Each structure stands twice: as C-alpha cells, then as structure tokens.
Image (cartoon, coloured by chain):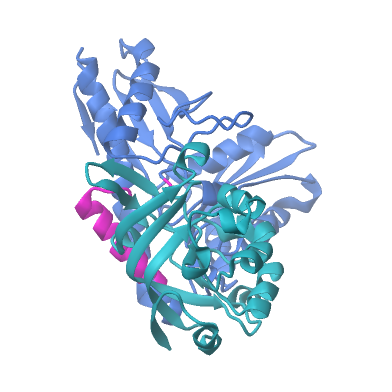
Chain colours: A blue, B cyan
Amino acid sequence: MDYEDIKKGIVQLIKKAETELPTDVINALKKSYGIEEGIAKTQIEAILKNIDLAKKSGRPMCQDTGIQTFFVEIGVDFQHINKLKGLILDAVKIATMKIPLRPNTVDPFTGENHKDNTGDNIPYITWDFVEGSDVYITALPKGGGSENMSKLGMLKPGVGIEGVKDFVVEEMIKAGGNPCPPTVVGVGIGGGADLAMKLGKKSLLRPVGNRHNDKTIAAIEEELIKRINESGIGPMGLGGKTTVLDVHIEKAHRHPASLPVGIAVQCWADRRAKMVIHSDGSWEVK
Amino acid sequence: MEYHFKLPVDSGEIKKLHVGDIIYVTGKIFTARDEAHLMMLEKDKNSLPFDPSEMALYHCGPLMKKTDKGWQVVSAGPTTSSRMEIFEDKFIEKYGINIIIGKGGMGERTEKALQKYTGVYTAYTGGAGALAADKVEEVPAVYWLDELGMPEAAWIFKVKEFGPLVVAMDSHGRSIYKEIKR
C-alpha cells in the first residue's frame, strides 16, 4: 500500500473541490443567468467568469477556502482503516501549502492559528460504513459566511410541517445577502438538535436539481425554493429572482415532544468533490 | 450610470452616486476585517503607517502567497460586511473613508455615517475571489500580519479597474438592502 500516493490523491481531491464547481451547480447558475436582469445579472456574470478563471488558473475560486470538511464512507472490507485519519490530516497540511489554502483554523480561546488548516477536531470528518472494500471520500470545504447563517429551531410539534416551512423561509429572508446567494439550503428535520443540523449539512451532498425520493418531501422542497425565490432577495442580496439554487431536505424520526429543524446554508460556491480509494491503494478523483 | 474613478475621490463625485450605479476604482485600497477595525479604532490616527483617507476600504480577508518577488494575491473576494457594522460609523468618522467595498450590506449606523460624512457602500460579488485577484496589480505593503494573521491583517492593494462595484448604499440615505426587505 503506497500511503504517499493516497495522500497525493487526497490533495488532488481538495484542489478539485477548491478550484472547480460540480456541473450541476454551474448549470443551475447558468439557468439563473438566463432569467436575471440588471444588477442581478451582473452578479451571476461575475460568478460565472470567476468559476471559469479559477478552473483555468488552478486557484481557489473563493479566498475563504473554508473549514476542511470530509464525509468518508468506508467499505468494511478495506484493510487500512487505521491509516485514513492520518492520511487526511497530512493531505490537508500539504494542500494548505501547495494549492494554497487560507489558514482558517483559529483556537477559540487563544486565537492561535496552526496555519495548516488543522486544529482540535478539525478537519471535520464524518465516518460511515458501507459494504465492500472501497473507501469513498467527499470533500465539502465550508465557508464561514454561509455557515454563520446556519440555524437550529427546536419547534413545537404543534406547528406541524407548515411551521417548519415558515421557519425555513423566514430564516432565509433574514439572512438576506449575507450567505452569498444564490445559496443551496440543506434542511434536516427530526432527530435531536445535533442530528437535525447534521442532516441539514449532509443533504448538501446531494447534487443541485435532484429531488428527494419521497414525493411529499420533494414537493415541499419545490415549494420552499419557490417561496424563498419570491422574496426577491436575489444574487448577493441586491435584488433578483434567484435567492436559492436549491433546497434539500433530509429527515429522521423525532421525539414526540420535539420538532428540531436544522438549516445548513451553502453559498453559490457549492464546492464538492469525491474520490474513491480501492483496496489495493489505487484511487480516482471524480 | 457607470463611473470609473481614480482614488482618492472627492465628496463632489461621491454625491453624484446613487443606489444602483456601477463603479470601477483604480488606485490604492486597504483590507480590514473585524480585528483590523478594532485595532485601528484603538490606535492614534497619526501613528498609522498609512493614510486610509487616500484609499477605499475593502472588507476582505485575502488568500495570499509569498513569492521571491514579494506577496501575491491568490484569491481576494469580499467578506461579510455586517460583522463590521459595530465599528464602521466610528471608523468612517476617524479615518475619512468615503468608499467601502464589501458584500451583503450594512445597517443603519453605517447608513447614517455615509450620509453625514458623504460616503458610499459598494457591493462586490461575494466569492468572486479569483476574479478580484486579477485586478490587483501590486501589493505595496501589509500591516500587522504577525499579530493578526493572513485574513485579518491590513493589506494594501494597488488595483486597476476594480469592479464592477454596485453602489448599494449611497450618501443620500438610500440602501438597496433596506428597500428589498420591504
């Protein structure tokens, strides 16, 4: 097993996430360019130009290269599970120098910055298990401006799903131009406080334009997209038709007394990249 | 209307600007986020190593790279301006800032200061970091890098045709953000 080579693969994964947007996001932005006018159109135009320039020059599209966040699915038959965390940590340090990334991890008490994008509990890694012997790593670098607009609502179950919808719409209107709209909004409903937030963030992994499998939930996603876009906040909060590119919902069963709603907001730079590591150590970044 | 300015710009020019206008600026701008605002408000105006009144203020925490030829901008889009709302009116008053570049808009205190001291708040497309970096010709200086770190330090950028910047709050009391919220 060539661990150095796997590290190279993870660095490439981070670079891809930071410098190239997935086609589903680009297509949604192009669609927005087609329907916007005036100032709103100038904003989408700048975004599209920026995406193009970042890809061509291999530079991060946004100076906020985010908190390095990974979702890892480990095939239960993969033989080197104990090495994965160390490899990801090393790759983040290398990527910080090589790409480069902005040193974004600050100790909340001392203000100390390791300058390599690692620190206590960071990079933030979510581990999960799947069948087989392959490992899948998704990088989702998360910017601060959009993260600051996250919300947790511990709603009263009596307000029902209508109350959940109103909460999401109201919070996104309050956020205005701060999270760099047009955004992608992830909504986690149910579970407890932490699970609702986690599901909200995890739902951001779903490609833009993909609806939930459950038809009722898919219809609510569509309703929320429509209602938030009707607010007129528009690109960068300067007015327009596109405030969100998409809304994704995931759910968990809830306690009878609780109705937690977690909102995770992703800016237009909905950065995602995925890689697979095979059992023999070979890898591909997709 | 579209305007192309050489910095610094006098009050007469600022007064001509209205919400919705687009401007491009050429000259020196300096970056300041929360920490630099706080530090500069505590400092004696005359002890500063640069003159903010000659520059536009850019809410930005850039991604920089040190090369043999000095500092180079890799990516430098605007940061969320609302975090600076608690400092900005005093900052405008103390340093004579009349063009602010940021994203997401600011509140009532800044709005009043822009009216009182004749200034504008302009919006640059959030996240367009690579595009912004392309308009920076030179990085003549950086201040407080060791104390504040890369994103929070005050970077001086020499820019050419930096924009498009949308006038989102003008010196006549109008704010695009307030009008949209209604």
A169, above or below A258, in the image: below
Nearer to me, A247 or B40: B40
Q: Residue at x 29, y 22 (%)?
A: A134
Res. B66 visible in picture: yes
Q: Which residues are magenta?
A: A43-64
Nearer to me, B118 or A231: B118
Q: Residue at x 34, y 66 (%)?
A: B159
Give percent across and percent down for residue A28: 37, 62
A125, above or below B151, in the image: above
Majority SS type along the magenta span = helix
For the N terminus of chain A, give its image quadrant. Answer: top left
Nearer to me, A125 or B119: B119
Nearer to me, A229 or A270: A270
Residue A60 drawn in magenta = yes
A280, above or below A230, in the image: above
Q: Residue at x 66, y 39 (%)?
A: A190
Instruction: Classify residue A231 by image quadrant.
Output: bottom right
A59, above or below B176, in the image: above
Task: Report whether B102 appears left or right of B171.
Answer: left
